Image: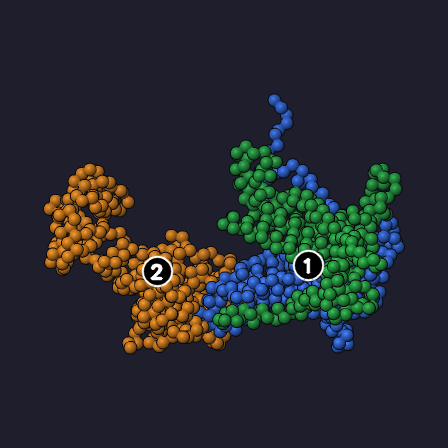
Chain colours: A green, B orange, C blue
C-alpha cells in the first residue's frame, strides 16, 4: 500500500469505527438473531433454526401442523408496498409540476421557492406528521372546511385509515421528490424545448418526448428517495394509522416488545433491508447505464 | 562547479506510468540557467516545459537525474524548503486572505519578524503598483491585478529563482503586452533569476536573455533570442519560432542544388541531402536572383506585404516585403519573379 | 380588429403546472401554519380558538419533563454534531484530493450506510446490541444515544465538507508549500480556513438531524431518557394538548434559524 492510500485509510478510520459500532455492526447481530429461537419471555435462545424466516411467510396450525400462508404478515407487507408505491405516485404527480415551476422561475425568485421547499424538508418529521394530523382529524381544518362548504354533513373519518397514512406520507415525503426533480430540471437545456417547438411539437409532446426522457434520472432519484423511507416508515403510520393499519416498520417494532418474538422481528428487519437494497441496486443500475449512454 | 549557475538540471527525467506504457514527460534533460538571467522554456503544450518547472519547484520528483540550486543538490528537498517561488498559471491566490496577507505569507512562513514583514509588503505593493489594494480580497481584483499580486507574493521572500508558469496566458492581448514589459522591468530591478514557461514564441523573444526550446520531453536548442531565431538547429525550432520557408536539396561544399535544379550559395553546407531554412523577410526580389518563382497571391498586412510564391517544382514560398508608402508593392498574381536570399541568411538544418 | 391581445408564447409554460405548484405550496404550509397559530391559542382545545396567548409556551417551559428533555436533546445534538463533523472532516480529507485508493468505495458505502438502511432496522439492531451491553456493564447513561446519533450524523456532516474540499483548488496548497509553509502550516493556514464553512455546515446539519431524530432515540434510550421528540411522541399517544403545538413551533423556529444560517454559509462558495 502506498503512503497516499495509507493516509486515506488512517484518516477515514475513526469515522469507520464509529459507523461500525454505532450503525452497521449491529445489523450483523440482527442477521444472526433471525436464525435463532425466541426466548421464553423475550430475547433469544442460542440455537440455530430457520423457523423465524419460515414464519415470515407461512404459519403452522397449532393443532394439526398444517402449513398455510401467513396472512397477517403478508397483508402488512402488501400494505407497506402498496402504500409506498401510491405515495411515490402521488408525490410525483404533485412534485413534478412543482419542481418545474421552481426551475422556471427567474433566478432571483428561484432561491426563495427552493427555500420554501427546504424548510419542510428539514423540519422534524414528527412535527410535520403532527401538523397533518391536526388538519385531517374529525374536528380538524379539513372536515370543518368541507362542512362549512356544505359538501358534507358530518365529519368523515380520515384518521386511522390507510388513506390517512397515504396523505401523511405524501405530505412528509413531498420535498424528497421535489428536490432531485428540481436538480434535474435545473440542468435541463431549455433551448431543446425551443428546438422541439421549432420542429412542430405540441406542448404535450414536448413534455413527453423531450423533457421527461431527459430528466429521467431525476425522476428515478426522486422515486427512490420517496419509496425507500416510505417502506420503512414508522412514525407516520404509527400516528396516523392507529393500531390497526400497521406498516412493516410498526410490525417490526411490535415484535421487540415484551414477550414477543425477537427472531421474527429480526427476520422481518432483514427482509425490509433486502427490499430496500434491491430498490437501491436497481436505481444504481438504471442511473449508471444511463450515464454510459450519455457519454 | 561555477557559482554563477542558478539552477541546473542534470539528466533530469520524469516518466508517468511504468514499463512500455510509460510516458516520458521529460526525457533526460540537462540544462543550466545562469544567475540573474531571464530564461524562457518555450515549446508546444505537452513538450515537458511545465514538468521541468515543477521539478525545479519541487512539486514533483524526477524519475532519474538531479536538480541543483546554486550548485547544491535539492532533488530530495520538499518545496517548502527550496528558496524558489512560483507564479502559478491560475495565480493560486489564497481567497480567504487579503492582498497584503497573501504577499506576507511566505515571509511569515520563513519566520521573519513582523517589523520586517510590514515594510517589505509595502515595498512589494509599490513595486507592482497596487498600494491602494492592500486590504482587498483577491476576488475583488481584476485579472491583471491578481497577476501582480501573484508576482509580488512570489517575489516578497526574495527567492533565488522565480518560476513563472505561463502567467500571462489568462490576460487579454493589450494587458499581456504591458505585463511583458513589466516582468522585464521587475526582473532587471530585482536581479532575481526568472525561469519563464510559455508556448508563445513572441513572448519568449521579447523578454528572454536566453531561450530553451523543448519538444516531446527533450531540449532542442538553448540560446539567445537572436541565435535561436537566426540559427535554428533543426526544422522543429525553425518552424516553431517565426515563419520559415523550407527547401530541400543536395549540398556540395559551399553550394546547394535544390529540387528545381537551381543552385544556391550556402557557405559551409557540407555534403549530401540537406534541408534549408529561409525566413520570409530574408528573401528579396532581384533580377539576378538564383530562384525563379511565380507569384500566386499578395496579402497586405499593413507594414508588410506577404508574397505567396511557387517555385518550378511546386514548392510554396512566402516572402515578406516592406510595404511602400503607397501600400501597393506593384506586383500582380501570375507574374514571374526572380528571388535572392539575403547573403548569409540561409540556414542548414539538422534533421529533426 | 380584435381587442384581445395574444398572450406571449412562453417556452417554459406547461398547462396547469403553475396551479398545481401553488397548490402544493399551500398544502405544504397550511398544516404547519395552522400548528404555529394554534400554539398561541389561549383555550384548552386544539380545535377552538380562544384568543392569543403565550400560555402553552409557559406551561411547556415550566414542565420539568420538558425542560429535562430539552437539555438532553441539546446535549446529545451538540455532542453528536461535534463528533460527527470532526470524524467526517478527517474522512473527507482522506477520501478527496488524492488518487482513489483501494477500498475507497467501501469507505463511501460505510459512510453513507445510515442513509440507505431503513431507520427502523438500525433502531432494532442498536436496541439488541446496546441492551446486551447495558446488561453486561450496568451503564445506562447518555453515551449510547450520543454514539448512535453521532453515527447516523456522519453522512450528513460528510457531504458538505467533501463538497467543499472537492471544490478547492489544489494549487493553493502547492502555493503555500512554495512559500515555505510546512505541511502542518499549510493545513492550518490554508486548508482548514478554506474548508471551515463546509465543516460548519456539516456540524449544523448534524445538529438538526440529531435534534429531529425519533426512531433510533426511542429504541436506544434507557428509562427516563426522553428527548423532546420522544416526549412528544409519548404525548401524542395520549390526548393531544396545545403544549405539543408550542414545543413543535419552538423546534420549527430553531430549524428555520439554523437552515437560514446554513444557506448563508454555503452560498458564499469560493
Look at the image and tell me whether residue A120 can be seen: no
Placement of A194 over or under B64, stated as above or below:
above
Q: Nearer the viewer, residue A169 or B95?
A: A169
Q: Residue furthest front?
A: A64
State the CA–CA distance, disc 1 to disc 2: 55 Å
Q: Is residue B254 left or right of residue C208?
A: left
Q: As drawn, is C36 to the left or to the right of B88?
A: right
Q: Nearer the viewer, residue A282 or B108?
A: A282
Left or right: residue C123 compared with residue A102:
right
Structural crowding at the residue carrying mark 1, measured as other residues with C-alpha within 10 Å and reported as few (<14), some (14–19) or many (≥20): many
Chain containing the residue with disc 1: A
Residue C250 position (above or below residue C131): above
Taking A222 as reference, is C152 above or below it? Answer: below
**Quadrant in the picture for residue B345:** bottom left
**Local SS, label 2:** loop
Image mark for residue C29? none
For label 2, the residue is: B47
Chain on which label 2 sits: B
Rendered image quadrant of residue C138: bottom right
> What residue is drawn where x is 60% and y is 42%?
A212
Q: Which residue is mark 1?
A: A273
Mark 1 residue element: helix
Amino acid at each position: 500500500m502506498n503512503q497516499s492510500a495509507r493516509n486515506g485509510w488512517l484518516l477515514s478510520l475513526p469515522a469507520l469505527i464509529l459507523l461500525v459500532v454505532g450503525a452497521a455492526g449491529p445489523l450483523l447481530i440482527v442477521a444472526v438473531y433471525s436464525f435463532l429461537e425466541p426466548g421464553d419471555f423475550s430475547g433469544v435462545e442460542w440455537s440455530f433454526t430457520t423457523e423465524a424466516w419460515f414464519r415470515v411467510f407461512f404459519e403452522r396450525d397449532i393443532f394439526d401442523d398444517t402449513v398455510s400462508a401467513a396472512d397477517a404478515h403478508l397483508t402488512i407487507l402488501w400494505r407497506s408496498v402498496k402504500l409506498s408505491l401510491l405515495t411515490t405516485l402521488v408525490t410525483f404527480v404533485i412534485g413534478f409540476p412543482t419542481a418545474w415551476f421552481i426551475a422556471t422561475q427567474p433566478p432571483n425568485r428561484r432561491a426563495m421557492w427552493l427555500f420554501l421547499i427546504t424548510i419542510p424538508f428539514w423540519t422534524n418529521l414528527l412535527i410535520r406528521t403532527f401538523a397533518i394530523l391536526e388538519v385531517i382529524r374529525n374536528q380538524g381544518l379539513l372536515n370543518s372546511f368541507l362542512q362549512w362548504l356544505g359538501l358534507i354533513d358530518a365529519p368523515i373519518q380520515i384518521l386511522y385509515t390507510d388513506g390517512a397514512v397515504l396523505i401523511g406520507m405524501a405530505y412528509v415525503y413531498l420535498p424528497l421528490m421535489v428536490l432531485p426533480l428540481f436538480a434535474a430540471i435545473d440542468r435541463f437545456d431549455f433551448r431543446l424545448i425551443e428546438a422541439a417547438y421549432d420542429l412542430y411539437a405540441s406542448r404535450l409532446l414536448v413534455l413527453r418526448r423531450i423533457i421527461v426522457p431527459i430528466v429521467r434520472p431525476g425522476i428515478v432519484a426522486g422515486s427512490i428517495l420517496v419509496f425507500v423511507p416510505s417502506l420503512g416508515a414508522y412514525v407516520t403510520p404509527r400516528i396516523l394509522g392507529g393500531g390497526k393499519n400497521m406498516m412493516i416498520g410498526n410490525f417490526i417494532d411490535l415484535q421487540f416488545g415484551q414477550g414477543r418474538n425477537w427472531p421474527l422481528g429480526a427476520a422481518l428487519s432483514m427482509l425490509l433491508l433486502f427490499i430496500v437494497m434491491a430498490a437501491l441496486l436497481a436505481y444504481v443500475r438504471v442511473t449508471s447505464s444511463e450515464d454510459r449512454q450519455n457519454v | 562547479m561555477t557559482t554563477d549557475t542558478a539552477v541546473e538540471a542534470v539528466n533530469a527525467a520524469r516518466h508517468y506510468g511504468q514499463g512500455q506504457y510509460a510516458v516520458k514527460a521529460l526525457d533526460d534533460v540537462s540544462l543550466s540557467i545562469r544567475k540573474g538571467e531571464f530564461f524562457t522554456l518555450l515549446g508546444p503544450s505537452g513538450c515537458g516545459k511545465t514538468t521541468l518547472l515543477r521539478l525545479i519547484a519541487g512539486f514533483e520528483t524526477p524519475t532519474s537525474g538531479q536538480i541543483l540550486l546554486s550548485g547544491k543538490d535539492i532533488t530530495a528537498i520538499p518545496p517548502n524548503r527550496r528558496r524558489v517561488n512560483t507564479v502559478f498559471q491560475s495565480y493560486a491566490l489564497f481567497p480567504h486572505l487579503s492582498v497584503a496577507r497573501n504577499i506576507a505569507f511566505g515571509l511569515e512562513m520563513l519566520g521573519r519578524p513582523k517589523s520586517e514583514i510590514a515594510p517589505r509588503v509595502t515595498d512589494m505593493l509599490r513595486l507592482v503598483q497596487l498600494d491602494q489594494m492592500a486590504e482587498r480580497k483577491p476576488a475583488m481584483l481584476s485579472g491583471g491585478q491578481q497577476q501582480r499580486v501573484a508576482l509580488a507574493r512570489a517575489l516578497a521572500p526574495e527567492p533565488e529563482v522565480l518560476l513563472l508558469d505561463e502567467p500571462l496566458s489568462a490576460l487579454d492581448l493589450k494587458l499581456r503586452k504591458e505585463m511583458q514589459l513589466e516582468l522585464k522591468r521587475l526582473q532587471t530591478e530585482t536581479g532575481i533569476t526568472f525561469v519563464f514557461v510559455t508556448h508563445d514564441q513572441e513572448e519568449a523573444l521579447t523578454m528572454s536573455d536566453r531561450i530553451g526550446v523543448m519538444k516531446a520531453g527533450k531540449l532542442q536548442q538553448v540560446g539567445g533570442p537572436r541565435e535561436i531565431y537566426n540559427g535554428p538547429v533543426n526544422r522543429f525550432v525553425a518552424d516553431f519560432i517565426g515563419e520559415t520557408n523550407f527547401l530541400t536539396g543536395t549540398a556540395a561544399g559551399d553550394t546547394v542544388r535544390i529540387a528545381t535544379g537551381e543552385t544556391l550559395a550556402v557557405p559551409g553546407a557540407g555534403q549530401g541531402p540537406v534541408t534549408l531554412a529561409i525566413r520570409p523577410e530574408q528573401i528579396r526580389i532581384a533580377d539576378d536572383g538564383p530562384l525563379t518563382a511565380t507569384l500566386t497571391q499578395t496579402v497586405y498586412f499593413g507594414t508588410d506585404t506577404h508574397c505567396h510564391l511557387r517555385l518550378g517544382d511546386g514548392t510554396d514560398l512566402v516572402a515578406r516585403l516592406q510595404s511602400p508608402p503607397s501600400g501597393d508593392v506593384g506586383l500582380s498574381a501570375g507574374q514571374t519573379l526572380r528571388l535572392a536570399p539575403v547573403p548569409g541568411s540561409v540556414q542548414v538544418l539538422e534533421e529533426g | 380588429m380584435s381587442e384581445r391581445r395574444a398572450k406571449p408564447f412562453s417556452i417554459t409554460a406547461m398547462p396547469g403546472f403553475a396551479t398545481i405548484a401553488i397548490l402544493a405550496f399551500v398544502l405544504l404550509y397550511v398544516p404547519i401554519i395552522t400548528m404555529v397559530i394554534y400554539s398561541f391559542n389561549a383555550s384548552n382545545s386544539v380545535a377552538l380558538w380562544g384568543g392569543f396567548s403565550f400560555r402553552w409556551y409557559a406551561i411547556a417551559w415550566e414542565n420539568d419533563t420538558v425542560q429535562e428533555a430539552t437539555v438532553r436533546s441539546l446535549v446529545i445534538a451538540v455532542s453528536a454534531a461535534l463528533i460527527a463533523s470532526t470524524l467526517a472532516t478527517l474522512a473527507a480529507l482522506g477520501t478527496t484530493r488524492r488518487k482513489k485508493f483501494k477500498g475507497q468505495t467501501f469507505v463511501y458505502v460505510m459512510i453513507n450506510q445510515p442513509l440507505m438502511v431503513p431507520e427502523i432496522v438500525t433502531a432494532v439492531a442498536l436496541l439488541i446490541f446496546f441492551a446486551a451491553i447495558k446488561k453486561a456493564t450496568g451503564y445506562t447513561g447518555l453515551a449510547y444515544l450520543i454514539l448512535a446519533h453521532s453515527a447516523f450524523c456522519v453522512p450528513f456532516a460528510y457531504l458538505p465538507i467533501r463538497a467543499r474540499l472537492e471544490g478547492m483548488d489544489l494549487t493553493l496548497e502547492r502555493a503555500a508549500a512554495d512559500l515555505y509553509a510546512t505541511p502542518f502550516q499549510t493545513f492550518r493556514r490554508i486548508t482548514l480556513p478554506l474548508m471551515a464553512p463546509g465543516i460548519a455546515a456539516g456540524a449544523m446539519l448534524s445538529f438538526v438531524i440529531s435534534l429531529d431524530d425519533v426512531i433510533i432515540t426511542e429504541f436506544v434510550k434507557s428509562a427516563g431518557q426522553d428527548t423532546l421528540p420522544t416526549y412528544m411522541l409519548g404525548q401524542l399517544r395520549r390526548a393531544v394538548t396545545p403544549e405539543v403545538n408550542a414545543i413543535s413551533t419552538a423546534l420549527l423556529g430553531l430549524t428555520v434559524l439554523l437552515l437560514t444560517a446554513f444557506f448563508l454559509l454555503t452560498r458564499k462558495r469560493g
